[in-house]
Image (cartoon, helix red, strand yellow):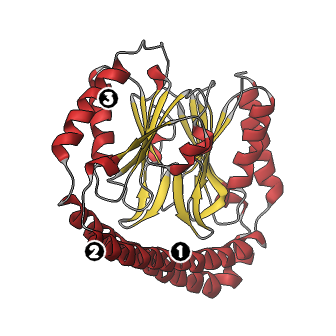
Amino acid sequence: MANVRRIFPGGNTAEGFYSLHDNIIGPNRNMLYILKGMPGGGKSSMMKEIGKRAYEKGYSVELHHCPSDPNSIDAVVIEELRIGIIDGTPPHPVDPVYPGVSEVIIDLTQYIDRNNIKGYKSEIIKAKADNKKAYRKAYNYFKAAKSIYSEIEESNKEYVDFKAINEFSLGFLDEIFSREAREVKRDFKVRNLFSSAYTPNGYIDNVKTILVDVGTRYYLKGEIGTGKSTFLKRVIDAATLRGYHLEVYHNPLIPSKLESVIIFELGTIISTNAKILEFPNTVIDFAKFLNKPEGLTEENNEEIRLFNELVLGGVEGLKGAKENHQILEDVYKKTVDYTGVDKIRERIWQEIEGKI
């Protein structure tokens, strides 16, 4: 049965823009169309339309959303055909590995009216400069939020019984890996992505869409610093040793931390994402490994309040960046020949139909 998965191949994080675009489509792809172009040039609309047509033909589709404009997409993948289309412009430039064989570059800038666009030069330069400042603000706020997160983490760690977590981990791993594994075919052994992101529209979470064929769900409940991300890393190590296929989803603010792991052979997800609770699940509560004084709880609550304020400040920066990007889109829309872009879309679709 065809389905649509919505994920983020990059994120606005405490480390700046964090790209996992190498994980969009595997090395065994049949074809990757790399779109080079301009803001407002029709790249996202083209990919959405082709994804819609493929889904209507009965194919499963992945929509890779842009964290800086979640209504736009950075890529579409038609899973069964191993065909992808990707926006290959900065901040996530993509270039072909085997040009003409498994990748092709499509330059949409050829449809810009070069004489017309020159009249908007100063407007474009200003919007790009303002855009850079807005992102700087966003990432500085996110970096500050990470510092508060780290403080909470370190203070809580003092009261965690890591020996008990280790003992529990061994039992849990024995339990899940004693189950019969099913045969799966996937292009990545370990694939890294985001299921959630901080965007100009706030925090957006698409974890529900990645639960296709995942029948067993574990929710890791617990405060910051109680070992949940480390627990997930142990699961990954154990699954990798067994040669299983995994999808690893990263924390949208601190990508070195993990949010979810899917083990496809076991049809299992283990996640710190609370949206898992909306589906049948098993809760693993890390509170049983934490014994901290009441005064520290009150202190943590104040720090969490500050953390949330800083994250909101980062989102405000992203809103400013989106406003400046909209200026660029509006300018370019006045100068683009969309009939040419439409012809490119139809040419790509005809090539895809030839493989159906």
| Quadrant including the C terminus | top right
Left or right, 264 with reference to 157: right
Q: Residue at x 54, y 43 (%)?
A: 276
Picture quarter containing residue 6?
A: top right
* Mark closer to the observer (2, 3): 2
Q: SS of the residue at dot 2?
A: helix
Q: Which mark is residue 315?
A: 1
* 219 relative position to 55: left or right: left
Element assignment for label 1: helix
Q: Label 2: how many residues lie within 10 Å, few (<14), some (14-19) or many (20+)?
A: few
Q: Between marks 2 and 3, how big is the CA–CA gap?
A: 32 Å
Kindly tell me whether residue 92 is visible in this rendering. no
Q: Residue furthest right?
A: 339
Residue toward you, 14 or 291: 291
Q: Earlier in the sequence, mark 3 or mark 1?
A: 3
Place of residue 85 in the rendered image (x, y in percent of width and height, measured from the top left): 62, 42
Left or right of 350, for residue 152: left
Give the numbered dot on residue 295: 2
> For the point 53% across and 35% down, which residue is it?
281
Say which quarter of the image contains residue 164. Answer: top left
Residue at the spot x=27%, y=67% of the render? 150
Q: Position of residue 247 (x, y in %)?
A: 44, 35
**Can you identify the residue that label 3 sits on?**
172
Q: Looking at numbered disc 2 in the image, what kind of residue is underneath it?
A: Gly
State the CA–CA distance, disc 3 to disc 1: 38 Å
Q: Nearer the viewer, residue 184 or 208?
A: 208
Q: Amino acid at mark 3?
A: Phe
